[in-house]
């Protein structure tokens, strides 16, 4: 069972790397020529890899599976929207290109932030929301997208995460609390088990 989840994580990592620039030489050149564009390209891949890494580090294989579903749904919805509005005013990029709405870079980066926030708490999601917001800024700044495109990409990721992601409950969580009743004083011991 564990190998299935590790295989899913590996497949997601390979897919995420395929989204970014494949040539190491061009990556280095992009970082030299236009660092904010390069950072946006990097975060669209790095954020999902971090999300998978966190699930594996915690031994949360259910979370790995949920993020795989989350990422696949966000990717499919983004591509469906891109192709459905491609030949409309919303499909035209500021630089004249096609498939502007919504931003795929932003939806990929935000999917990880939304998932970590919904699964483990805002403390996990906040740093990735910061990098996702920078990705959104870089896409608008480089004239690849309009603000509506990046907002829609992040909103799409947020909504999908709300539908798919369940909060994480640590299987080893134990709590001890004092208990006071009218005729008794004691200690209440409770265990929380993962579903």
Image: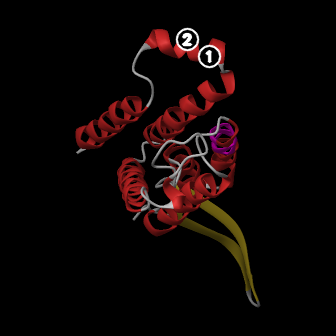
Disc 2 packing (10 Å; few <14; some 14–19; many ≥20)? few
Residue plotted at (51% across, 16% down)? 27
Image mark count:
2
In the image, residue 95 above or below residue 162: above
Residue 86 visible from this viewpoint: yes
Of 82 and 195, the residue lying toward us: 82
Residue ID for mark 1: 31
Instruction: Give the structural element (helix, strand or loop) at label 2.
Output: helix
Of 12 and 189, the residue lying toward us: 12
Q: Do the residues labelled 2 and 1 touch (CB within 8 Å)?
A: yes
Left or right: 99 in relation to 135: left
Asked if residue 134 lies in the magenta stretch, the reply is: yes
Magenta residues: mostly which secondary structure?
helix
Residue ID for mark 2: 28
Residue plotted at (45% across, 29% down)? 20
Q: Residue furthest bottom?
A: 182
The quarter holding residue 1 reads top left
Q: What label sits on residue 11 in the rendered view? A: none
Residue range corresponding to the magenta coloring: 131-139
Separation of disc 2 and disc 1 at Cα?
A: 5 Å
Q: Position of residue 3 (x, y in %)?
A: 24, 37
Q: Position of residue 137 (x, y in %)?
A: 70, 42
Q: Where is residue 42 in the image (x, y as percent from the top left)?
A: 55, 29
């Amino acid at each position: 069972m564990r190998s299935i989840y590790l295989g899913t994580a590996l497949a997601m990592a390979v897919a995420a790397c395929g989204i970014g620039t494949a040539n190491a030489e061009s990556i280095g050149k992009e970082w030299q020529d236009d660092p904010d564009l390069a950072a946006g390209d990097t975060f669209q891949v790095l954020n999902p890899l971090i999300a998978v890494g966190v699930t594996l580090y915690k031994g949360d294989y259910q979370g790995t599976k949920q993020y795989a579903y989350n990422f696949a749904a966000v990717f499919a919805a983004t591509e469906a929207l891109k192709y459905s509005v491609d030949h409309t005013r919303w499909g035209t990029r500021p630089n004249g290109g096609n498939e502007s709405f919504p931003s795929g870079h932003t939806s990929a980066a935000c999917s990880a932030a939304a998932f970590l926030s919904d699964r483990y708490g805002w403390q996990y999601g906040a740093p990735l929301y910061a990098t996702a917001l920078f990705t959104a800024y870089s896409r608008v700044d480089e004239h690849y997208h309009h603000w509506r495109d990046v907002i829609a990409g992040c909103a799409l990721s947020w909504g999908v995460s709300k539908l798919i992601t369940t909060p994480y409950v640590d299987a080893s969580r134990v709590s001890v609390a004092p208990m006071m009743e009218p005729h008794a004083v004691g200690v209440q011991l409770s265990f929380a088990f993962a579903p």
